[in-house]
Image (cartoon, grey):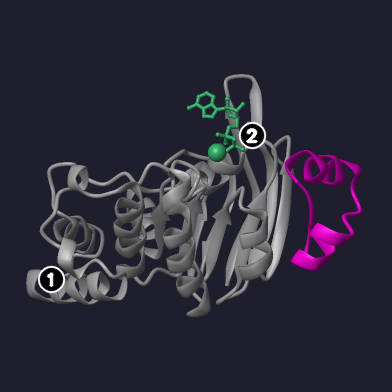
Amino acid sequence: MIRLEGLTKRFGDTVVLDGIDLTIQPGERVAIIGPSGTGKSTLLRCINFLDRPDAGRIEIGDLSVDAARVSKAQVLALRRRTAFVFQNYALFANRTARQNITEALRTVQRRPRAEAEARADAILRETGLADKAGSFPAALSGGQQQRVGIGRAMALDADLMLLDEPTSALDPEWVGEVLDLLRRVAERRQTMLIVTHEMQFAREIADRVLFMEGGRIVEEGPPAQIFEAPRDPRTRAFLRRVS
Ligand code: ADP
Ligand code: MG
């Protein structure tokens, strides 16, 4: 089980995460929606300490971290249990598709080279990128680059996959292939916390949808409830704006 308790983050005087409480069950796929500037990315980034939370507790399985008194070893342990998919892919430009995946397995998980390479090859086949294994990111389309980014996260077999608007930097022509791959990841019951603007997609793959505004979870529920019968006026106003 994954549990956040009172997760709090300030940038200067601004409270960006205002004591987030959230429990995610293994295999659960949770989508986060909400206006921009609301703390969605910061929430994801605080879970693996890409941003350092000011207070709160993060529990993943038997690992329990108090943000106020965290050790370097605990941060590394959190990162080993999570995998992050970035809006802008965040691939190493001077590494091939295959190397981007093997490197993650070797540095984050300390896997032996041969094992990392075998895993990378399996993932490249699964994501339909076997023929791009030796290509550098600049030679790949946006859709292919993001499929490498997702493949890299898949390879880690993490307890929790964190995805921050994985399709919003893509040209429209590449969105479909990336959503198709994400559907497959979701079908495997990979535990996911995904920030997305793709409401139809969230509705399709999520077990639960969270609506965030002002650093808080304002409303949450099954997709049918959030999208068809939102209770909070802020959720309703947001959905009217984006639909
Ligand atoms: P969202 O992902 O919902 O659009 P973010 O989590 O990116 O929102 O940002 C939430 C708020 O925190 C915004 O007001 C943003 O300007 C601020 N913020 C995010 N990152 C930083 C930072 N590194 N330094 C200062 N302010 C930041
Ligand atoms: Mg964001």
Q: Percent position (x, y) of residue 156?
A: 32, 67
| Mark 2 residue type | Ser
Pick the front one: 97 or 70: 97
Farthest front residue in view = 173
Q: Is residue 180 above or below residue 45?
A: below
Question: How packed is label 2: few (under 14 Cα within 10 Å), some, or many (20 or more)?
Answer: few
Q: Percent position (x, y) of residue 97?
A: 19, 57
Question: How packed is label 1: few (under 14 Cα within 10 Å), some, or many (20 or more)?
Answer: some
Pick the front one: 62 or 141: 141
Pick the front one: 141 or 21: 141
Between the C-alphas of marks 2 and 1, the distance is 38 Å
In the image, what residue occupies the spot 41% across and 54% down? 84
Farthest top residue in view = 13
Cβ(mark 2) to ligand 1 < 8 Å? yes
Q: In this view, does 86 lie to the left or right of 59?
A: left
Query: Which residue is the site of mark 2?
Result: 36
Q: Percent position (x, y) of residue 62?
A: 48, 71
Would you identify the image quadrant in which residue 76 lies? Answer: bottom left
In the image, what residue occupies the spot 20% across and 42% down? 138
| Disc ID at residue 117 | 1
Q: Is residue 73 above or below residue 1?
A: above
